[in-house]
Amino acid sequence: MKSDFFSQFENKKDAGFPFAESIIHRLTPTLLATLIALSFFLIASVFSYAVFEGREISVGKEGITIEPGEFSRPPSIVPDPIAYKVAPTLPEPDYKNFHILKDVRIIDLRSHRLVPAHKKDEKYSPVTWSRYTLMEKNTESSAPLVFEFGTSGVDLSPRCLTHEYQLVKSTGPHFHGKTNLKNTWHVQVDVSDEKLFRPFLVITEATYWNAFNEKDKEWAAMVAQENTVTDELVMIILFPKKRTFHKLIRYAYQHKEEERKQFRGTDTVIPSKNGQVLLWRIKNPVPGYVYEAHWDWKLPTGVT
């Protein structure tokens, strides 16, 4: 696929979202996610091929391909870390030596379930958040590349699938606006072998336990790092069949601000008509801004 999948919808102003929904409603979440993954990583790079934890990833002149098996398999559960360091606080990740070409989050809610009060301290409801970051190194540096994961839930388990890494867990509070992230981790990735100005892919992921536990509404966020340029942010959310979404609201605001502001920029939003898949893409996001997708939960017709 040599053309951008999203361009089918962006240039059809008269059709609008109903047109997009009619196309996507005919696609299964597996096929849809595969098509998106096939299409939006359009860069030139040296061919390579590897398998990470059973995932087939190819990087070539046509871009990056995530094979269908990546989404047809059951949702992954990241195992608990065996070895990690602790620190009282964690600094903000520093990306000044890098240029981010594509930063994609795939949030897999298919195993999500509401956590009853008597289960709130147990690992009961998993959500796995996978991040595919395509980037270039602009300056030589021996410092690790840091990816941050945080949750207000009972715990999370992070890892990196493409590079050597170390984990650091904060023993103190870490805030996202007014939200206290009780469990915050840094995945420190060794990219010292990556060449200057040559695109490379980093895959990180984490399983969040007992997060996304609001009964009626929920949200997910992605951040455009403030000390670098990000060409494109993408969020793909896969929802449970028995607990889909509707009534989407998008917000954008500076990372250090507390007040959410409704998003007013240019973006692409493609919701499936059945409420099981949501795609949100932002080109040239503002450095240092948080982009949040808020939705209402909805039971499909005929399910109680």
Image (spheres, rainbow, N blue to C red):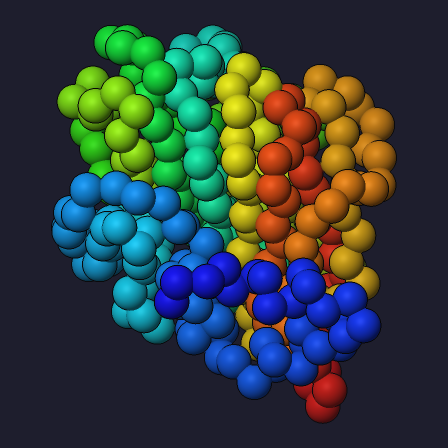
Left or right, residue 113 beside residue 159 = right
Above/below status of 166 relative to 127? above
* Quadrant that contains the C terminus: bottom right
Where is residue 268? Give x, y as percent. 67, 55
Query: Across the whole image, how many numbered discs are drawn on residues?
Result: 0
Q: Which of the two residues, 106 or 150, is positioned nearer the viewer here?
A: 106
Residue drawn at 35 percent across, 17 percent down: 138
Residue drawn at 49 percent across, 47 percent down: 105
Left or right, residue 117 beside residue 246 = left
Residue drawn at 46 percent across, 54 percent down: 40
* Quadrant that contains the N terminus: bottom left
Q: Quadrant of residue 253?
A: top right
Q: Quadrant of residue 115?
A: bottom right
Where is residue 137? Give x, y as percent. 32, 21
Where is residue 275? Give x, y as percent. 66, 72
Residue drawn at 36 percent across, 45 percent down: 43
Examine the rendering and report whether any part of residue 116 can be seen.
no
Examine the rendering and report whether any part of residue 282 can be seen.
yes
Above/below status of 118 relative to 170? below
Left or right, residue 270 beside residue 76 = right
Above/below status of 142 relative to 130? above
Residue located farthest toward the bottom when viewing the structure as drawn: 302
Where is residue 269? Give x, y as percent. 68, 58
Q: Which of the two residues, 152 or 206, is positioned nearer the viewer here?
A: 206
